Image (spheres, rainbow, N blue to C red):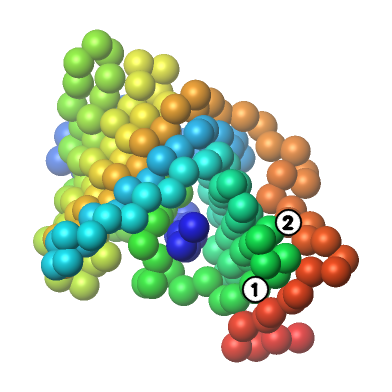
Amino acid sequence: MALLAIIAPAGHFLHAQETPNFDELKNKFEDGQVFYAQFTHRYEDSFTGETQQNSGEIWIGRDQYKIVGSTQVMVVDGDVSRVYDEDKNRLIISDYIEEEDDFAPSRMLQGVDESYRVLESAGRNGTTEIVLQSDDPFSVFKTVTIMLSPEGTPSEIQARDQAENILTTRFSDGLFMNPKSELFDLDAPDNAEYIDLRYNTQ
């Protein structure tokens, strides 16, 4: 499950119109709530035509998130990425580099950054479509489209990057929750192999 984490605090945005549902979504993260869901993530390479797909459970907070797949667990806190591979009984710890992320659900849900314009419109059956657009050639994504359910929970994120690659994440059974203190812990077995790739190890 080659997923990297992106976390970024919500910033100030150039609103082309009122965006009450998007503002409410960001406020939930600001208030410390965590979004939980089952997910599938699909990456489509525009150059090769190849696709990669992963699925599992995800917990998204303001400054961190956690993914549990069939054989791997990943936790990212904004500075450090930790990935435990059950098949290899190996824990890899590395510095988190935001610019190299190819997944980015939590960053997208909070607005990416201040260079994006935000448009919000009503969809079908009470859903909401939120489109983030950037003309900055150095931004990671050209567009990010977030679909919210009638209850205000994310149901899908689709992003297009500068190379026209498409990333689609679909959520099911999503809900916001108050997290337990140990939610983002990652405890590998005592006999696991530890590989620390951080530049400034202690």
> Tag 1: Cα neighbours inside 10 Å, few (<14), some, or many (≥20)?
some
Query: Splitting the image into 4 quarters, where does residue 114 fall?
Result: bottom left
Residue drawn at x 29%, y 45% is 168
Depth check: give the residue in front, 125 or 10.
125
Find numbered disc 1 in the image and state the secondary structure of the residue it sits on: strand
Outermost residue toward the top in this view: 125
110 relative to 173, above or below: below
The residue carrying mark 2 is: 186
Say which residue appears at 62% left-offset and 52% top-offset.
71
Identify the residue under disc 1: 93
Residue 16: name its quadrant. top left
Residue nearest the viewer, comparing 157 with 90: 90
- Point out the tag, 1 or 2, that comes first from the N-terminus: 1
Q: Is residue 11 left or right of residue 120?
A: right
- Check the image and report above or below for 139 versus 179: below
Question: Which percent across, then down, holds residue 18?
Answer: 23, 31
Instruction: Give the percent coordinates (x, y) of residue 167.
Output: 28, 51
Q: Residue at x 46, y 74 (%)?
A: 97
**Looking at the picture, how far across and down is residue 47, in whole percent?**
14, 67
Label 1 and label 2: CA atoms lie apart by 11 Å
Around disc 2, counting alpha carbons within 10 Å, would you say few (fewer than 14), some (14 to 19), or many (20 or more)? some
**Residue located 51% across and 33% down the image:** 37
- Does residue 169 sit above or below 88 in this rendering? above
The kind of residue tagged 2 is Leu
For residue 168, side relative to residue 66 (left or right)? left
Q: Secondary structure at mark 2?
A: loop
Tell me if residue 199 can be seen. Answer: yes
Horizontal and vertical percent position of residue 164: 14, 60
Image-quadrant location for residue 195: bottom right
Please indicate whether residue 29 sits to the left or right of residue 191 in the image: left
